[in-house]
Image (cartoon, helix red, strand yellow):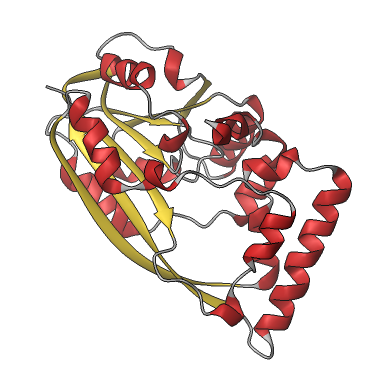
């Protein structure tokens, strides 16, 4: 899959991840808390990045571990955890080759990354490290209500730079839940959590740097791309202080038999 080449390119933008990626809402982790099997003691966040998806897991009262294949992302996550006095066991590991014994975790979570490894090898590894009746909980953010035309970044800008997006089917709840069932998970279900948030021009521009595709651009193209995005958004914003975007957290979960 063409989009898969980007999963190795996020590290150089680790600081921008911390700065510009929007935190996940409390409602998401409230849902997770309701699903955690009784008597659970440990949770693993796969593709943890800089810790945006990992740090809120502390509230569950479990031992929290996070893994990412990128050393720069893990370094940033460790620094953030230290700054916030959070005890999280971070390690460098790829989901297809998790460095944990069998039956290590009660819960495995994946935030906005499952599309990179929705394959049998990864699922086999996840099921291997999950305890019997353990929970796999994956989620991602999608824009479900298109921004008004005057507030959007024109598709022509992305097309100019041959921007590659994640295939729609890899972020489709029905498709993901079907994959879960095919992989042998039980009690598979999906949820949707609507969210809305305010975001400034600079935050929207900065957010573009956290895409893996951004790192495939030349330094010149990076500068011109961000300049074009900033120009059109500034014009669109007018006299307002920020844009208000409406999105949705889409969730798929299932249990190991």
Q: Is residue 183 left or right of residue 15?
A: left
- Extreme top residue here? 101
Residue in front for this viewpoint, 228 or 162: 162
Q: Is residue 115 visible?
A: yes
Residue occupying the point 38% across, 12% down: 100
Q: Position of residue 133 (x, y in %)?
A: 13, 25
Q: Quadrant of residue 57?
A: top left
Residue occupying the point 37% across, 16% down: 121
Q: Is residue 98 visible?
A: no
Q: Is residue 3 left or right of residue 203?
A: left
State which quarter of the image contains the C terminus. top left
Q: Position of residue 153 (x, y in %)?
A: 63, 68
Q: Position of residue 200 (x, y in %)?
A: 64, 73
Residue in front for this viewpoint, 230 or 54: 230
Residue in front for this viewpoint, 163 or 225: 163
- Extreme bottom residue here? 239
Q: Is residue 121 left or right of residue 236?
A: left
Residue occupying the point 18% across, 31% down: 181
Q: How many marks?
A: 0
Residue 179 vertical placement versus 195 (above, below): above
């Amino acid at each position: 899959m063409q989009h898969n080449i980007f999963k190795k390119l996020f590290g150089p933008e680790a600081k921008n991840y911390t700065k510009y990626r929007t935190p996940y809402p409390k409602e998401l982790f409230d849902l997770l808390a309701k699903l955690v099997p009784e008597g659970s003691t440990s949770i693993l966040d796969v593709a943890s990045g800089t810790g945006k998806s990992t740090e809120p897991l502390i509230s569950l009262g479990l031992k929290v571990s996070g893994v990412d294949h990128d050393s720069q992302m893990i370094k940033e996550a460790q620094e953030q955890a230290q700054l916030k006095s959070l005890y999280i066991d971070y390690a460098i590991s790829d989901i297809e080759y998790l460095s944990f014994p069998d039956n290590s975790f009660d819960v495995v979570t994946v935030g906005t990354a499952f599309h990179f490894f929705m394959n049998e090898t990864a699922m086999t590894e996840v099921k291997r490290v999950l305890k019997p009746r353990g929970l796999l909980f994956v989620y991602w953010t999608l824009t479900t209500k298109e921004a008004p035309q005057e507030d959007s970044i024109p598709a022509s800008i992305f097309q100019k730079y041959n921007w590659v997006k994640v295939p729609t089917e890899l972020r489709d709840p029905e498709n993901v839940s079907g994959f879960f069932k095919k992989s042998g998970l039980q009690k598979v279900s999906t949820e949707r959590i609507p969210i809305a948030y305010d975001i400034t021009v600079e935050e929207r521009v900065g957010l573009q740097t956290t895409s893996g595709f951004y790192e495939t651009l030349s330094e010149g193209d990076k500068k011109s791309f961000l300049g074009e995005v900033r120009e059109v958004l500034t014009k669109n914003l007018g006299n307002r202080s920020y844009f208000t975007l409406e999105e949705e957290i889409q969730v798929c979960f299932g249990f190991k038999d």
